[in-house]
């Protein structure tokens, strides 16, 4: 077949530039990425072979081999997975299909582009090979195609790449890295083994390397023909909880998410009963860049009996828990389950409900830690969680009615008594004698809320008011009407009824004032005709002469402003 030269998609060029210029401080991740691709390719083969066992040909044992050649200055990562056809090589190695990647790239400005952490977190994939290589050659044959339909793809990782057809007996892919000048440190069994240990221990396939022995005549290590497995090759979540250390859980988190900041918390359980599954779920310490994209798929990977099925299986978690990362391994689902099927499966529903409860328990045990030893630390971690993800959790109030009560307990607010961290329970515990309802006000900013004239009477009487300044608060409160039997009442709506908190004298005064100011009120009402529904005397003000309130049951002024901003 003819050799063709093709050009990389513009985004690939951009990514290549970024990768080679930003990740030089953490070069070793290239191996993590290439081993992960090799492992994905084996997963894909196993998956396709469910319907077509012939794809295994005569090599049913899936594995990854890493080898190196010191003289030729090459590292080769081989797998006997699904392989690539020529078209696939052109498509998958020349363009970025994932819309998330494009979006991510377009958001990076110069400053951020140098933030290797951010890029590392995102997962840079195949192109990370160019951190250490000035040429990468990929030789592959797709499972099911003939030996005459192999492909060789090669590129220096700048503007373009070459593809040609080759003859190749072996199924699967060899990725051959031709090392850059100065990268010889990677040409060592010890070095490569330790990188595998660091990032790829939990890959559930064997990763093999050639054994070496010391040759005293030659005065150097020589490679033997014998291969040995250099990773643990056991899925971490399938091990018993008592056998896994905290450090291992954290290392697995990093491997799963590319996030080098340790998670705030995790939970690992084997669930038995109507639906049988294992869950290993993490709460990250930091929000990802695209947390606000509600279309973004969740962060939980689905396995069925240790076989990888899909990334980001959104049906496994409610949208408002989209920040949770981890793995769910089901014993019941069919291996060929699709995203569509997942949405309807009763097993998945049971898994989603069970996992939601687990996540809520995890949060509750931080927020309301009863462990004396760790309580202070747990509470600090909950505060950190709230700062990153609180607004997302609030979506659950409207979306998950079954857990609304539990979620309401997890909410934290600012109030007239504390700038943050006030729970409904704290508020209720501080309620005044005779106070029945929970008062709140919504505003764009904390300063605006604090200075609102509507608060005057509450300040005077020492009644706490929750200050809600998050965009989702109004929406959330349209779904939450009470806490623990106490109605939630906006101080910016209707005639504030202070109920038993108001003494008889005050009530009488107000009534008398309303009577004596009647002509004045009528004149003001007339002047504001069409702009104000009603003008009335109030006892809620102390220093200010007047304030605006919305009618009970109407949108608050704050929500009306938000909607107007949004063009509604
Ligand atoms: P990702 O793995 O997140 O999809 P990568 O940049 O790592 O992104 O890889 C791009 C694509 O190249 C993969 O999705 C896959 O289709 C293909 N690919 C990479 N390595 C291999 C391999 N060893 N075998 C088969 N296909 C591969
Ligand atoms: Mg990859």
Image: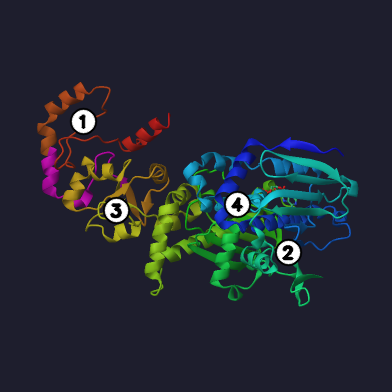
Element marked by disc 4: loop
Q: Do the residues labelled 2 and 3 touch (CB within 8 Å)?
A: no
Q: Mark 1 points at which residue?
A: 535
Question: What separation in Å lies between label 1 and label 2 (alpha carbons)?
Answer: 75 Å
Q: How would you rate the neighbour count of disc 3 (Cα within 10 Å): few for under 14, some for 14-19, many for 20 or more?
A: few
Position above or below: 306 against 20: below
Question: What separation in Å lies between label 3 and label 1 (alpha carbons)?
Answer: 33 Å
Which mark is in front, 1 or 2? Answer: 2
**Does mark 2 have its CB less than 8 Å from ligand 1?**
no
**Does mark 4 have its CB less than 8 Å from ligand 1?**
yes
Magenta stretch holds residue 198: no
**Does mark 1 have its CB less than 8 Å from ligand 1?**
no
Residue 259 on image: x %, y %: 54, 57
Q: Mark 2 points at which residue?
A: 205
Q: In this view, does 271 lie to the left or right of 456?
A: right
Question: What separation in Å lies between label 2 and label 3 (alpha carbons)?
Answer: 51 Å
Q: Mark 4 points at which residue?
A: 123
N-terminal of the pair, mark 3 or mark 1, is 3
Element marked by disc 1: loop
Q: Do the residues labelled 1 and 2 touch (CB within 8 Å)?
A: no
Report the magenta residues as a range: 489-511
Element marked by disc 3: loop
Q: Which of 460 and 363 is in front in this view?
A: 363
Which mark is in front, 3 or 1? Answer: 3
Q: Which of 84 and 537 is in front in this view?
A: 84
């Amino acid at each position: 077949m003819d050799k063709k030269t093709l050009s990389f998609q513009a985004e690939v060029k951009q990514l290549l530039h970024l990768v080679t210029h930003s990740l030089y401080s953490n070069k070793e991740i290239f191996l993590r990425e290439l081993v992960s691709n090799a492992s994905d390719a084996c997963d894909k083969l196993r998956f396709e072979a469910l319907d077509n066992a012939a794809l295994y040909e005569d090599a049913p044992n899936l594995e990854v081999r890493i080898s190196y050649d010191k003289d030729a200055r090459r590292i080769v990562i081989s797998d006997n997975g699904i392989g690539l056809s020529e078209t696939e090589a052109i498509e998958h190695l020349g363009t970025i299909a994932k819309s998330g990647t494009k979006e991510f790239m377009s958001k990076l400005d110069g400053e951020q582009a140098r933030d290797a952490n951010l890029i590392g977190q995102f997962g840079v994939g195949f192109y990370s090979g160019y951190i250490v290589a000035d040429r990468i050659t990929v030789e592959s044959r797709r499972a099911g195609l003939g030996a005459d339909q192999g492909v060789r793809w090669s590129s220096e990782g700048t503007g373009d790449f070459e593809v040609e057809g080759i003859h190749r007996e072996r199924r699967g892919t060899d990725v051959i890295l031709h090392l850059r000048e100065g990268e010889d440190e990677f040409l060592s069994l010890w070095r490569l083994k330790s990188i595998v240990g660091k990032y790829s221990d939990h890959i559930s396939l064997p990763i093999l390397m050639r054994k070496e022995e010391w040759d005293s005549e030659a005065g150097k290590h020589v490679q033997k023909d014998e291969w040995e497995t250099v990773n643990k090759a056991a899925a971490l979540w399938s091990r018993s909880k008592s056998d896994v250390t905290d450090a291992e859980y954290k290392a697995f988190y990093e491997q799963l998410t590319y996030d080098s900041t340790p998670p705030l918390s995790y939970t690992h359980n084997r669930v038995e009963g109507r639906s049988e599954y294992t869950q290993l779920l993490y709460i990250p310490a930091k929000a990802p860049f695209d947390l606000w994209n509600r279309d973004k798929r969740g962060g939980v990977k689905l396995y069925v009996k240790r076989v990888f099925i899909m990334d980001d299986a959104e049906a496994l978690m409610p949208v408002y828990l989209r920040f949770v990362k981890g793995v769910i391994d089901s014993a019941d689902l069919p291996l060929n389950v699709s995203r569509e099927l997942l949405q309807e499966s009763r097993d998945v529903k049971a898994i989603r409900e069970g996992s939601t409860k687990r996540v809520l328990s995890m949060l509750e045990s931080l927020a309301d830690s009863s462990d004396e030893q760790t309580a202070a630390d747990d509470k600090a971690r909950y505060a950190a969680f709230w700062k990153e993800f609180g607004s997302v959790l609030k979506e659950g109030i409207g979306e998950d009615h079954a857990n609304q009560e539990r979620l309401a307990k997890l909410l934290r607010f600012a109030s007239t008594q504390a700038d943050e961290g006030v729970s409904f329970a704290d508020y209720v515990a501080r309620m005044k004698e005779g106070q029945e309802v929970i008062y709140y006000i919504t505003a764009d900013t904390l300063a605006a809320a604090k200075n609102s004239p509507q608060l005057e009477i509450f300040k005077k009487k020492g009644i706490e008011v929750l200050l809600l300044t998050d965009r989702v608060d109004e929406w959330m409160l349209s779904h939450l009407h009470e806490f623990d039997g106490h109605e939630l009442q906006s101080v910016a709506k209707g005639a504030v009824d202070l109920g038993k908190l108001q003494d008889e004298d005050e009530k009488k005064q107000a009534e008398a004032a309303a009577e004596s100011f009647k002509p004045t009120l009528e004149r003001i009402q007339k002047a504001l005709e069409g702009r104000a529904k009603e003008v009335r005397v109030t006892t809620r003000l102390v220093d200010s002469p007047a304030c605006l309130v919305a009618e009970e049951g109407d949108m608050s002024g704050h929500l009306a402003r938000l909607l107007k901003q949004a063009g509604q």
